Image (cartoon, coloured by chain):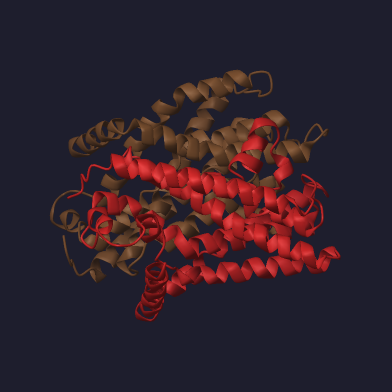
Chain colours: A brown, B red
């Protein structure tokens, strides 16, 4: 465990060296959410709500999609893919050191640093829209939200690991990273609340894991439909299922791996 | 001038050869990139499930808008994105070439470092864009004037120039902040604004997005002209704006080159 804490500490310090990039990434992450809020405000016009979602809900929803990225999201499949391609994965095969955990830990360090850097802007947004957004969770709902965020982050991490491990079979990781991004946009609710999407997307989202990364925690935070314990159970099932899948794919990938480079 | 055309011609030939050597890379881009169009199409459908008019556009006009954006964006990717992306590596120096070496060549440095890599995989997205425009036009039953088509095509070309100058400006920042890795992301985020109607942006933001750095030239402004919503002289206005942006970014590039301290080699 100490070795991974060391990885986290080093990555955290390295990230702090390049604060301008972190602020830049926050802007990059915020801009699509701001556009989406503007789009939905335009559609709302003089209407009070769309499918029960008010102006405040849209702000809160896309605000979560920006900040939630630093809790649930990440893009470490690129690193993992590059390490497999370059042969850096060899160290994971010879030492008691898991390269997937290392990549994931590095990503967590980036996320924590970004979250800290973006805190002033976050507080400012919350202050500006204090009269529009209504954050009304009791302590039990808040606990449910935290559990859902954790499970969502685990699902996302395992999906990223699977995308990264595709490099055992294919030379490029980016097509899989792109497909993952597309699925997250459509079925994860990052593009629009799933309840507003066409019925086909809603039905597909219900059986795929992507909805349980961002959309379910966002729904709990907006607190419109009431608490549905089934969502947490499905999240837990997906974590177990994806964990087993990750283990099996890793084993199959290592059997195929020829350790070129490194 | 001949040298520039020779360089572009030879680069094009080389990329065609690469295309045949690495067919799988081409096919991956060819099939993967258009999937993003699917996301936007589903978003258009999501919007028009809730309203019949979005920022002055009906459903089919939105298809024309997104098709135009798709063409402009992918032509930009096809023509210069990958070369401009390399600029950071050129400044830092890599195994193949460095800016130090390029500066000694008897050719315009800006052109040499920003043009010369063509990614044919984006052709599929351009085809998707064309399909969306025709789908929108046929179903919208709009009578299009020939002069508007000419104006539309000129504005689309200007839209490609906007993409060039904005990305070029952001990449030039690397001269000043060599670890500023976020420029690609910033450009992606800014160019995303081009896929929505210009009327969506109001006030100072609208002024920036529609006039100062008119990223809506990637879609909305050409479509407005095509549909006869804005006057033909708009083309002249935007030629002037783009020429000004080109001069400013060229000037910034020259200043940055003077500041360049050759830290790569």
Residue A51 shown left or right of residue A193 in the figure: right
**A64 shown above or below B184:** above
**A8 shown above or below B53:** above
Residue B142 shown left or right of residue A17 in the figure: right
A197 and A129: which one is in front? Answer: A129
| Residue drawn 57% across the image and 42% down it | A32
Q: Position of residue A46 (x, y in %)?
A: 83, 33
Residue B15 shown left or right of residue A138 in the figure: left
Q: Position of residue A2 (x, y in %)?
A: 18, 35
B97 and A47: which one is in front? Answer: B97
| Residue drawn 34% across the image and 42% down it | B256
**Number of dots carrying numbers:** 0
Residue A240 shown left or right of residue B60 in the figure: left
**A113 shown above or below B39:** above
Say whether residue A114 is visible. Answer: yes
Say whether residue A248 is visible. Answer: no
């Amino acid at each position: 465990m100490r070795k991974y804490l060391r990885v986290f500490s080093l990555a955290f310090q390295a990230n702090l060296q390049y604060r301008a990039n972190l602020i830049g990434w926050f802007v990059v992450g915020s801009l699509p959410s701001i556009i989406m809020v503007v789009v939905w405000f335009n559609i709302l016009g003089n209407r009070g709500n769309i499918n029960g979602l008010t102006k405040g809900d849209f702000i809160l929803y896309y605000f979560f999609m920006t900040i939630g990225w630093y809790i649930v999201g990440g893009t470490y499949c690129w690193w993992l893919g590059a390490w497999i391609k370059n042969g850096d994965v060899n160290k994971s095969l010879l030492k008691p050191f898991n390269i997937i955990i290392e990549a994931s830990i590095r990503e967590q360090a980036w996320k924590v640093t970004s979250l800290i850097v973006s805190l002033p802007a976050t507080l400012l947004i919350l202050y500006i829209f204090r009269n529009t957004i209504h954050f009304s969770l009791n302590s039990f709902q808040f606990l449910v939200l935290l559990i859902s965020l954790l499970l969502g982050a685990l699902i996302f991490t395992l999906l990223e690991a699977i995308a990264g491990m595709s490099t055992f079979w294919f030379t490029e990781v980016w097509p899989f990273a792109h497909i993952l991004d597309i699925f997250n946009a459509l079925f994860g609710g990052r593009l629009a609340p799933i309840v507003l999407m066409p019925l086909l997307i809603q039905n597909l989202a219900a059986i795929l894991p992507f909805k349980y990364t961002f959309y379910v925690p966002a729904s709990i935070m907006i607190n419109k439909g009431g608490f549905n314990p089934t969502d947490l159970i499905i999240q837990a099932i997906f974590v177990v299922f994806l964990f087993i899948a990750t283990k099996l794919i890793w084993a199959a990938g290592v059997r195929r791996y020829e350790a070129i480079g490194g | 001038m001949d040298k520039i055309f020779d360089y572009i011609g030879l680069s094009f030939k080389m990329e065609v050869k690469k295309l045949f050597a690495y067919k799988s890379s081409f096919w991956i881009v060819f099939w993967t990139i258009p999937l993003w169009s699917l996301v936007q199409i589903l978003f258009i459908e999501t919007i028009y499930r809730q309203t019949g008019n979005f920022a002055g556009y009906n459903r089919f006009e939105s298809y024309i808008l997104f098709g135009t954006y798709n063409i402009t964006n992918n032509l930009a990717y096809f023509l210069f994105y990958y070369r401009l992306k390399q600029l950071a590596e050129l400044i830092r120096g890599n195994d193949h070439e460095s800016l130090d070496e390029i500066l000694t060549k008897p050719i315009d440095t800006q052109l040499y470092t920003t043009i010369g890599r063509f990614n044919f995989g984006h052709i599929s997205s351009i085809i998707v864009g064309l399909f969306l425009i025709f789908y929108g036009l046929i179903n919208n039953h709009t009578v299009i004037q020939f002069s508007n088509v000419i104006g539309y095509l000129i504005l689309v070309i200007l839209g490609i120039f906007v993409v060039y100058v904005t990305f070029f400006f952001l990449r030039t920042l690397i001269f000043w902040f060599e670890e500023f890795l976020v420029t690609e992301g910033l450009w992606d985020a800014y160019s995303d604004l081009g896929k929505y109607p210009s009327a969506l942006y109001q006030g100072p933001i609208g002024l920036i997005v529609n006039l100062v750095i008119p990223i809506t030239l990637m879609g909305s402004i050409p479509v407005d002209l095509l549909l006869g919503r804005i006057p033909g002289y708009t083309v002249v206005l935007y030629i002037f704006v783009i020429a000004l942006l080109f001069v400013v970014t060229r000037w910034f590039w020259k200043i940055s080159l003077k500041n360049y301290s050759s830290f790569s080699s």
